[in-house]
Each structure stands twice: as C-alpha cells, then as structure tokens.
Image (cartoon, rainbow, N blue to C red):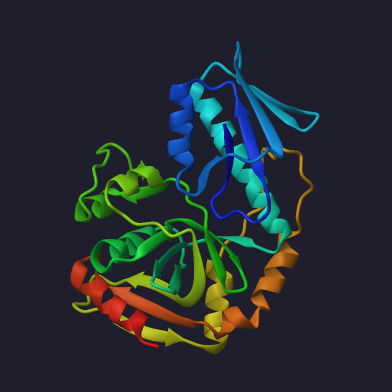
Amino acid sequence: MIYKLAKDKYGINVAVYGLCAEDEEKLSNQLSPFIVKSNNNFTHKIIVTEGIQNYFTLYDNVLYVTYINKNYMFKVVRQAIRDIIYYNYLESGYIKIHGASVRKNDDTYVIIGPNGVGKTSLALGLCEYCNYSLIDGDLVLINGLQILGWQTAIGLRKETAKILNFNYNEGSELTWYWPINLLDKGYNFSYDGKLKKIIYPKFDFKINTPDFRIIKGKNKRDTIINNIHYSEINKENYWNKPNIDINSMKEKFIKNNDIMDVTMIEYVSSGLNSDNIKKLDKILRRR
C-alpha cells in the first residue's frame, strides 16, 4: 500500500509492506483524510514484520519495523509516514504550529493560545453550529498565509464532549478521536486554505455575553510569539534526517509582514454554546 499527502506537491509516496488487509484498513483510517492511498511509485519504503521484540531500524533508506505489539507498530508506521512528509514541508519553508484551524468558503481562521484554553473546542463549535470545515483541531502547517492541516487525533475533555454529544471515557481526562471518527459524525474537512484572521480565545465564567477585542501592534506580536509553538521532526527521527534550525525559521516567520497584517481577535466567553459561537461567526465574517 502506498500513501501520500492529499494534494501533495512534493512527490513523497511511502510504501508499506507486510500488513494484513485488516491492518491496512485500520492504518488508512488513522491517516485519513489528510494522508491518502496512492497509485504512484514510492519514494520511501517501510517493511513490517512480527517478531520477538518492538524495534525499528533504517537500512539503505528502507525502514524495517519489527513488533510484538500492534499498537507499537501502528504508532511507528503512522508517525514515520507523517514525518517524511512533514520534513519536506519544513524544507520548503512551512512551520508546524500548535493551534486549531477552520475554514468557511474561501476564508481560513487559525486559533492560537496556551494549552487548555479551548482551541479544539472552539474549532469544533464553529463546525457544529456555523457549518465551518475543520482543517485541524490541534496542529497546522503554515507558510506565509498558506495553511495546511496536519490531521492527527484530537483529545476532547469531558465537558466539550458532553456539549457536542460525543461519547467520552469517564475515567480519562481526554477522549481521543481520529479524523475518521469526526467524518462519521458528519463533520466536514478541508485540507488547506488562506489565512484570513487569527482568533485568541479566553474564558471568563463571570460574563454573560462574549466580548471581542482587536489585538494590535506590539501586543499582537507578543501574543503570536508567546502562543505559537514550533516543533522539529519527531524525536525518533525514523529516516535519519538532519535537524532543521527551527529558531531561524521562527525568526523568519515572525518577520513575515503578511502574518503581522492579519487581524487578530481576542474572544472572551463564558463557555462553549451555540449563541456565543454564532456571535463569533458574525465577527469573523466581517471584512
């Protein structure tokens, strides 16, 4: 089976050998819809075999994965496919950002903020109540104003799951959903888009109606710097690629005038509900 990035323009195709039909289907579901099956010739190769221990090794540009635990195998293969695609995007000038992203028609919005502020919840709320498409609930790739999804599994807290009618694990802080699970629930996906506005959410349970403020100047720049997180290729570095200087990429990104010209909206609300989300939608749709 050969996988490539949906709308891939860098010609990276990863062939995986050794999976049974059931495991092929499971892997495809975990990668869908961001990474899709391909009929093209492969550029990278993974060979999977069951053995007496969990390990991987790279030899002659082929990644060999031996496993006794299938969860280990799926994790390594899934991440190895993502890593080689991600590396090529890094080389072409993209940066991975910890943030959610949604799209409506031709406009794309990125939601940034610290952990736990509700980026994923807000993105899903816009999809649920205002017919946005989800680009990503947790990670996005960005180059200039171009946004690309990196659709990994997203973790929902119990409160968000209850509001949006998701099943949740009572004994866990987060319940994880793959994109395929969101597709099954009727959510729409977009692979990419052009950045229109940045949303910076805050929660204040004392207020009755949401509050909006435009963040400008140094305040805006500092907010972007302090709340966007950069990451290199996966620490396992399955393909033995040289490290990319993330700090220099960060500086280049910060100096990007296109990003600094994008409107940033601070959105303060008392929680996730349809009325609050619809008011945010009206603000976002203003030109």
> At which x and y percent is residue 97?
56, 61
Q: Which residue is more in the foreground, 123 or 6?
A: 6
Image vertical order of residue 152 relative to residue 285, above or below = above
219 or 264: nearer the viewer: 264
Image x and y of residue 147, in percent:
54, 66
Pick whichever, 4 or 260, lies toward us.
4
Q: Which quarter of the figure has residue 134?
A: bottom left
User: At x 32% / y 83%, what residue is drawn?
Assistant: 283
Question: Which residue lies at the image location 40% right of the left edge and 47% below the top edge?
Answer: 179
Q: Would residue 72 be seen by someone viewing this image from the given angle?
A: yes
Decide: is 135 above or below 287: above
The N terminus - image quarter: top right
- Residue 203 as seen in the image, left or right of residue 214: left
Q: Measured along the vertical axis of the image, is residue 22 above or below residue 43?
A: above
Q: Position of residue 111 (x, y in %)?
A: 44, 68
The residue that appears at 66% across and 72% down in the rendered structure is 253
Q: Where, by quadrant of the figure, is residue 217 drawn? A: bottom right
Q: Is residue 117 visible?
A: no
- Residue lying farthest to the front in this orientation: 39
Q: Is residue 86 left or right of residue 272?
A: right
| Count of numbered circles on the image | 0
What is the residue that sits farthest to the top in this orientation? 52
Q: Residue at x 55, y 74 (%)?
A: 224
Point out the image quarter for the C terminus. Answer: bottom left
Q: With 43 as the anchor, is 264 left or right in this view?
A: left
